[in-house]
């Protein structure tokens, strides 16, 4: 059975953008018989959600799994009914999960099914410039909540320091330094530092294989021109 990757993080962490990039990267390496599934289970945030890029994903061969549009953000958010069956199949699955109490409940419900997978990567995405990750106490709270719900440990941290259009090399370096301190305090390795293409070559020598290039699919046009 292939790998399952869970990406969880607070609002503005960039986890949905990273989930899209993970899925599109995996589909490039898939064999004839393998399948790549992106499960959009962020049932709280209606903005910058993975399901906004459904056509782009499906055109590339990624199956997007998410709640029905009319039930996605209701008072009682609904999981896709086929999610449990698909978790048990042989596929590469990426789960985009909210980093809050609702995300914790979703993860708790699915935890016994997720654990049957042979390989599990459970990443917490941290952008230290966002309110939910601006200090160690907030990050530890999120970590403990997610681990308690899933009854499993977070296996790594993805550092995603940015201030959207104001991002420059110094902002990335200073933010990543903060994430490294969080990771050291929690005893969790930083697996990746994510950057846009315009910063990739600049940081490649310093970070090597830890550096991961991400493209931006969810940023609306009006934001790009500000």
Image (cartoon, rainbow, N blue to C red):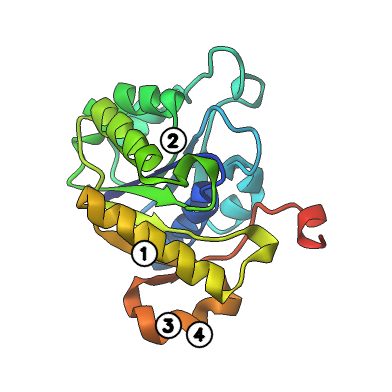
Which residue has dot 4 on it? 201
Q: Looking at the image, which residue is at 51% across and 19% down?
A: 78
**What's the distance in space between the residues labelled 2 and 4, CA to CA?**
31 Å
**What's the distance in space between the residues labelled 4 and 1, CA to CA?**
15 Å
Q: Element under label 3?
A: helix
Q: Nearer the viewer, residue 149 or 94?
A: 149
203 in relation to 150, above or below: below
Q: Residues within 10 Å of mark 4 (few under 14, many from 20)?
A: some
Q: Are marks 3 and 1 in contact (CB under 8 Å)?
A: no
Q: Element under label 2?
A: loop
- x and y, in percent, of residue 161 in the image: 50, 60
- x and y, in percent, of residue 101 in the image: 42, 24
Q: Are marks 2 and 3 in contact (CB under 8 Å)?
A: no
Q: Are marks 4 and 3 in contact (CB under 8 Å)?
A: yes
Which residue has dot 2 on it? 99
Which residue has dot 1 on it? 192
Residue 20 seen in render: yes
Q: Residues within 10 Å of mark 1 (few under 14, many from 20)?
A: many
Q: Nearer the viewer, residue 132 or 104?
A: 132
**What's the distance in space between the residues labelled 4 and 3, CA to CA?**
5 Å
Which residue has dot 3 on it? 204
Mark 2 or mark 4: name the one nearer the start of the chain. 2
Q: Pick the quarter of the image with the C terminus.
A: bottom right
81 in relation to 212, above or below: above
Mark 4 or mark 1: name the one nearer the start of the chain. 1
**What's the distance in space between the residues labelled 2 and 3, CA to CA?**
29 Å
**What's the distance in space between the residues labelled 1 and 2, CA to CA?**
18 Å
Q: Element under label 4?
A: helix
Q: Looking at the image, which residue is at 38% across and 58% down?
A: 179
Q: Nearer the viewer, residue 136 or 95?
A: 136
Quarter holding residue 108: top left
């Amino acid at each position: 059975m292939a790998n399952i990757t869970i990406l969880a993080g607070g609002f503005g962490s960039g986890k949905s953008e990273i989930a899209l990039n993970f899925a599109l990267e995996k589909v490039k390496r898939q064999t004839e018989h393998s399948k790549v599934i992106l499960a959009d289970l962020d049932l709280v945030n209606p903005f910058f959600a993975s399901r906004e890029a459904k056509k782009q994903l499906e055109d590339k061969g990624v199956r997007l799994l998410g709640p029905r549009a009319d039930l996605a953000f209701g008072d009682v958010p609904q999981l896709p009914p086929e999610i449990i069956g698909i978790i048990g199949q042989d596929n590469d699955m990426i789960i985009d999960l909210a980093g809050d109490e609702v995300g914790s409940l979703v993860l708790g419900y699915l935890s016994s099914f997720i654990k049957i997978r042979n390989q599990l990567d459970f990443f917490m995405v941290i952008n230290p410039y966002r309110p939910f990750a601006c200090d160690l106490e907030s990050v530890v709270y999120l970590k403990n909540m997610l681990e308690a719900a899933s009854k499993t440990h977070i296996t790594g941290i993805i550092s995603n320091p940015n201030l959207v259009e104001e991002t420059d090399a110094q902002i990335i370096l200073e933010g990543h330094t903060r994430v490294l301190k969080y990771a050291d305090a929690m005893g969790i390795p930083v697996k990746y530092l994510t950057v846009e293409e315009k910063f990739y070559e600049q940081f490649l020598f310093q970070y090597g294989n830890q550096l991961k290039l991400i493209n931006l699919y969810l940023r609306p046009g009006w934001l790009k021109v500000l």
